[in-house]
Amino acid sequence: HRRLTSEFHPNEKMGDTVLSPVDENLKQYRFKTETENNSDDGGLQDEEFEETPLYAAILTYLSYAILCLFGWLRDFLRQSNIEKKRGAVDPNAALGFVPLYQSYESFYTRNMYTRVRDIFNRPIASVPGAHVEVVERVSDDYNWTHRFTGKTINAINLGSYNYLGFAEKSGPCATDAINSIKKFGVSNCNTRTEIGTQRYHVELEKLLADFLHVESSIAFGMGFATNSLNLPVLASKGDLILSDEMNHASLILGIRLSGASYRTYAHNDMKNLEEKLREAIVHGQPRTNRPWKKIILVVEGIYSMEGSICRLPEIIELKKKYKAYLYMDEAHSIGAIGKNGRGIVDYFGADVKDVDILMGTFTKSFGSAGGYIAGSKVKSSLTNN
C-alpha cells in the first residue's frame, strides 16, 4: 500500500490530486490486505446490503400516511374539546416560550412516537446483564404519562451494549471500581481545566495508546461528548466533512457544531462516496470554487443503528487516493471485534496509521464510562486548537 502520513494538522491544505476513473477493484467488496490470508473475517468482506423492497417501502409510507391522517383528526378533536383525554398536547406552561420542536416534529411526537412510547426508555430495577428486571408501568392517557404498578418483569436483555458481560454487580470490573473508589475517591464530572489532570488520567491514556498501537490518546468523561465536542476542534469553516448517512447522532451533532460544510453519502456505498469526493475536489467550495482546506471522512466501525460493519479497506484506499483524512468512531467495535480486540482496524488487519483519528468509548466493552480519541499527534492537535 501507499503510505500517507497520518498526522492530523487542522490547518493543513490539501495537495493536488490526480483524478482517475473508478478502479475496478473498488466496485466489488474484495479488498486484499497484507494479512488477509492470516485473518478470519467471517466472510464479512463479502457483505452486501440489500435495498428495501418496493412493496415494503410502499406499505411503510402508506402506514405513515394513515397515522398522519388520524393524528390530524385527533388534534382537531382535542382542539374542539370533543376528545376529553387531552394527554398528547403541549403543556400550557410552555406557551410564550420558544418551541422546542418544529411543528411537524411536535406532531410526530404527539401522534406517532407517543403511541408506542411504552416500549422505549423502559426503566429497569437491575444491572443490564444477560437478564434484566423491567419495571412494569401502565398509562391512562395514551402514553403521555406512566404510573408504576410495583411489579417487575424478568426479561432477556437485548437492548443494551454489554457485549463482554462486564456490566454486572460482581466480577473484575465491579471489584476494580470499588477498589478505585477506595484509593482515589469520587469527584464530580468536570473538565480538566477545573479539576486538573490526575496521575491515573495519564496512566489510562498511555495504556490506551499502547493497546491501540498509536502515538497518543486523550480520555474524556462522556462518550457522546467525545464526538460532539471534538469534531468542532478538528474541523472548521473551509473544511468539508463527508459523513455516512447512518452515522450516530453524536457525530451528526459534532459535524453541525463544527461550522464546516458537510455532505452525506449512501450507507457503506463506496461508489457514492468516491463520487462525492471527486465532485468536492473538482468543484471546490460553493461560490468561490476554492479548494477545500481539508476533506474529512467520518465513519463508524460498527454502525450502532444498523449493526453493519464499515468497509474500512476500501475507505482507506479512497482516503489515500484523494488525500483526505479519516475519522472513525469505534464505540461499538473496540474491544468486541478483531483478533486482539482492537476493533475494526484489527479485524481487517489494516495499518492503524491509515486511520487519522480513532474514537471509542469505555461504556461498551470496558465496563466503565467516558470516551477517548487516539492517533498520531492527536494530543497536540486537540490541545493547540
Image (cartoon, rainbow, N blue to C red):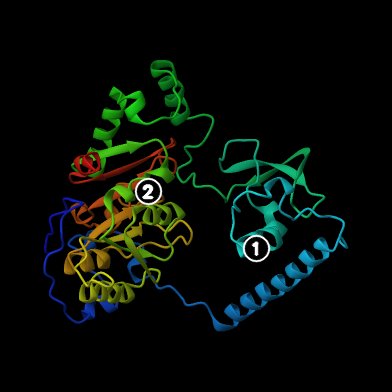
Q: Nearer the viewer, residue 180 or 58?
A: 58
Relative height, residue 92 to residue 280 (above, below): above
- Quarter holding the N terminus is bottom left
Q: Which of 243 and 171 is in front in this view?
A: 243
Type of the residue with mark 2: Asn
- Quarter holding the C terminus is top left
Q: How crowded is mark 2: few (under 14 residues within 10 Å), some or many (20 or more)?
A: many
Residue 154 makes an appearance in the image = yes
- Report the residue marked by disc 2: 227
Residue 335 makes an appearance in the image = no
List x then y, in percent, for residue 29: 30, 73
List x then y, in percent, for residue 310: 35, 63
List x then y, in percent, for residue 85: 84, 55
Q: Which residue lies furthest to the top in this view?
A: 182
Image quarter for residue 326?
A: bottom left
- Report the residue marked by disc 1: 108
Relative height, residue 206 to residue 300 (above, below): above
List x then y, in percent, for residue 14: 15, 63
- Judged from the image, the secondary structure of the residue bearing numbered disc 2 is helix
- Judged from the image, the secondary structure of the residue bearing numbered disc 1 is helix
